[in-house]
Image (cartoon, rainbow, N blue to C red):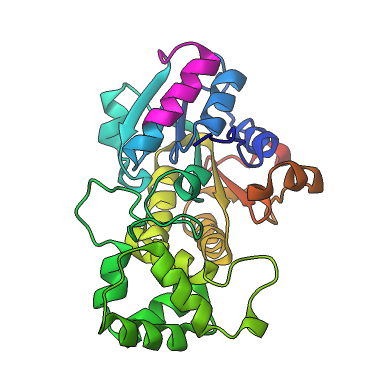
Amino acid sequence: MSESPHIPVLPREVIDLLQKTESPEPLWFLDGTAGEGGHSKLILQTFPNAKLILIDRDSVMLERAKKEILSVIGSLDRVHPFQMNFSEVDKELLDSVDCPGLDGALVDLGVSLFHFLHSGRGFTFKNDEPLDMRLEPQVGRKTAADVVNYSTVLHLKKVFWEYGEERWALKVANNIVQTRQKKKFATNTELVKLVETSIPRKFWPKESHPATKIFQALRIEVNEELLHAEKGIRVLSDLLKVGGVLACISFHSLEDRIVKWTFRDLKTTEHFDILTKKPILPTDTEIRENRASRSAKLRGIQKIDPILKPRWER
């Protein structure tokens, strides 16, 4: 199966934000969600003397990112890869690579297109795959099949409504429970067919598959994505040097809400300045060239000296 070339989302805008770092010579950056390595290679190209801490919870993606960086940069000498969740990064990890603090950090909260097209873990609607959806398949936590087959009706409804904002949450949950009494769900296509029959066709969305919100909700539940998002933002913001920048890309309203509220809280309770009054959105040109960018939103904050004002106010 051939793979389409990876195109990082909002590449120029991400670099523009990270270049607002106030370090005279930025030396340390962190990519908290390495993915396909698209943003990482841009950071290394933009800051030729800087080192990069490369983080991804999925070992497959971490290897893909390293391969992409190597193909473009020609070396991994400036790269320090770690397989872990970005919410688990701490000062001890920075100390292990002699990093005194971060000049900039990026978190791309979206799931890579690779997971949908090539991972074989049931993220897609097209291929018949095991209903897994774990971003860390080697970790023994629950799969999407476990959630579907063993959760109560009320829990399924809660997951579909809170994480997918699906108006048909209760009906889908009821139909799942009735169906699994005869046969447990094992594949993504089995769940797709149930959702398609649960939602009246006249209410199917025009630009997406009717199971999109259900699959999003299951993925978030399985991987605890929203919990890690808020925790990770707070962890990384604490590891920034004064003048350091944290940039976050989100892809749906639940993620963006967490980013926005956490940034506001950091501005109120800590020493941070919000760099993006409103989220930065992809241009029409980028959306035409990279359909995956259409729902992306970029926000940024900067750690400031509690005594000095930000440089643009001095």
Q: Which residue is the extreme one toward the left?
A: 140
Magenta part of the chain: 63-77
Q: Is residue 148 above or below residue 106?
A: below
Q: Position of residue 20 (x, y in %)?
A: 64, 33
Q: Is residue 148 left or right of residue 127?
A: left
Give the residue drawn at x 43%, y 40%: 32
Give the residue drawn at x 23%, y 45%: 138
Q: Position of residue 264 (x, y in %)?
A: 55, 60
The answer to if 75 sits in the magenta stretch is yes
Work out whether residue 145 can be spotted: yes
The answer to if 178 sits in the magenta stretch is no
Q: Is residue 242 above or below residue 150?
A: above
Q: Position of residue 309 (x, y in %)?
A: 63, 42
Q: Nearer the viewer, residue 67 or 46?
A: 67
Q: Is residue 89 left or right of residue 42?
A: left
Q: Quadrant of residue 160?
A: bottom left
Q: Main secondary structure of the magenta part?
A: helix
Q: Is residue 28 above or below residue 17?
A: above
Q: Is residue 75 left or right of residue 12?
A: left
Give the residue drawn at x 29%, y 71%: 147
Q: Nearer the viewer, residue 40 or 286?
A: 286
